[in-house]
Image (cartoon, rainbow, N blue to C red):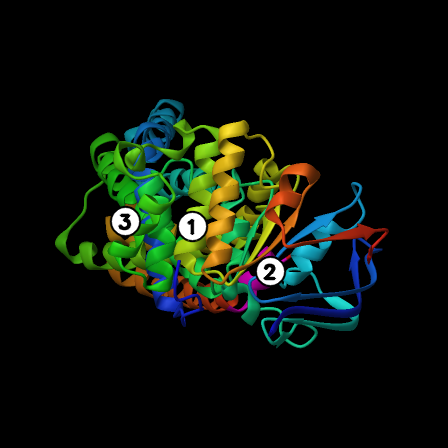
Amino acid sequence: MSLVVDFRDAVVVFNGFPALAGATFQVTRGEVVLLQGPNGAGKTTLLRACAGLLPVVRGSANVLGIDLCVDRQSVRARVGLLGHANGLFADLTIRENILFWAQVIGASTDEVTATMHRMGIDGRIADEKVSLLSAGQKRRCALACLVVRRAELWLLDEPHAGLDAKGRDEIDAIIREASSFGATVLIASHELERTKGLATRSVSVVAGQVQ
Amino acid sequence: MSGLGARPISISRVARVIATKDLRIELRSRVVTNQVFPFAGLVMVMFAFALDNDAVLSRVAGGLVWLATLFSLIILVQRSFAVDSADGALEAQRVAGLDPAGIFIGKAIAVMAQLVVLEMLLLLAAVVLYRVELHISGVVLLVTCVICATAGLAFVGTLYGGLTAGARGRETLLPLLMLPVVAPVLIGATRATESAFTSGGAAVSDGWPWVGVLAVFAVVFAIGGILSFGSLIEE
C-alpha cells in the first residue's frame, strides 16, 4: 500500500509555538483516518501542514510523494482542505461555484452535472445562490467542489459542525463514496461516535504529538 | 469521483476564470451599478456645488475625474477581496494551489473592466457638468491615458487589496497604504486629461509624456504584483 501521508518527527511552528512537536504519522491510500484530541492539540495544524500551508521546520514530511520540506506548493493542487469556512462565493449559485473549480482544472460541464447529481444538489437547487442555502447544503456544495477538483487527499476539519442529523448523514455518505473511489480522507473531529463509524482507523493528537 | 489526480493549470486559465468569476459576482450583486457609480457621480456633483464656477470647474475637471476614480477604486478593491474573504474563498484558492500570479492578474482585470466603465461615465459627466471641450485630437490621448492609468490603478489596488485582505482594520488600512502609492497616477492622469481637454491653455502634445509615466507605472506594478502577490496572501 502506498503512503499518502508520511510524517516523521515533524515539527511545525505556528505563531512562534510548536503546534506539532515531533509528530510521526503515516496514512495509506484509501484510508479514512479520524484525528481526535482536545482543542489546541494540533489537529488543525496537522491538516494544514498536510495541505502545504504551514512549513515543516524539522523532521520529514511527505504528502502524495512530495517532500513538503522542499516544496509546499505542488501538493496543494492535489489535496482538498475543508475547514470551518466553506470557501464558497456567496453571490454565485451552486452550479457556478462548482463550475468555477471545473473551469480552473479544465473539467467538462458533464463532470459538473454528474457531480451535482451525485451530491444531491442538482435540479432547482443548483441555481440557488449560495447565500440562500442551509448550512448542510453549503457543506455539500463545498464537498462537491473538492470532488470536481479531483482532490486525492481530503482534509476535513470538523466537517459535521453546524449540521443537523440529516446533513451529517449526507456528509458521511459523501465521505464513504469518496473513499470508495480511492480518495484518502483525514477527519479532525470531536464527534467521535459518528466519525469512528466512518473511519478505518483513529489516532489521537495530544500536545502536538500523534499517538 | 473516478480518475483522481491533478491536472496542470496555466496562469492564463486561472486569470481568465478569476476575472470571469469576479465580474459575474458584480453583475449579480449590482453593488457597482447601484452604489459605486452613483457614489462617483455624487462626488462629481458635489465638486460642482463646492466650486460653483464654470471657469474653475473646466480648469480642474481632469483632476476631479481622477479623484472620483480613486475614491471609487478603494470601494471596488475592498469589495473585490471582501467577496472572496467572506467564506474563506480566497484561502480556498490558495489552498488549491491556484497560481497567485493568475489570481492577481484575474482580479486586476476585473477591477480594470469596472474602472473603465466608471471612467467613461465620469468623463461624460465632466463634459456635461463642467462643460469641458474635447476635440478629436484629444480623444486618442484621452483613451490612451485612460487605458494606462486604469491598468496602473488596478494593479496597485489589487496588490494592496491582497496585502490588507486578512488584516484587522483593512477598511481604513487600504486607503492609507494605497493612496500615497497611486499619487503618481493621479498627477500623470490629471495632467494628460487636462491636455486632452486643452484646459488651462495646455496643448494636446503636452499630455503624451505623462502617458509615458502612466505606462511605466502600470508595467512596474504589474510585474511587482505578479512576483509578490503569492507572498502577500500566504500565511
Report x, y in % for residue B139: 19, 54
Find residue A192 and report its image quarter.
Answer: top right
Magenta stretch: dominant secondary structure: helix
Is there one chain holding both mark 1 and mark 2?
A: yes
Q: Secondary structure at mark 3?
A: helix
Q: Categorize mark 1 by other alpha carbons within 10 Å: few (<14), some (14-19), many (20+).
A: many
The residue that disc 1 covers is A145
Q: Amino acid at mark 2?
A: Glu
Chain bearing tag 3 is A
The residue that disc 3 covers is A113
Report x, y in % for residue B140: 20, 59
Whether residue B232 appears in magenta in the rendering, the answer is yes
Q: Earlier in the sequence, mark 1 or mark 2?
A: 2
Q: Amino acid at mark 3?
A: Thr
Query: Label 2 vs label 3: CA separation?
Result: 27 Å
Whether residue A89 appears in magenta in the rendering, the answer is no
In the image, taking residue B174 as reference, residue A192 lies left or right, namely right
Which residue is found at the position 62% from the left and 69% from the top?
A72
Q: Amino acid at mark 1?
A: Cys
Tell me: residue A79, above or below residue B65: below
Q: Earlier in the sequence, mark 2 or mark 3?
A: 2
Q: Which residues are magenta?
A: B227-234
Which residue is found at the position 63% from the left and 38% from the top?
A194
Is residue A204 visible from the viewing direction of this image?
A: yes
Chain bearing tag 2 is A
Q: Does the CB distance between marks 1 and 2 fall below 8 Å?
A: no
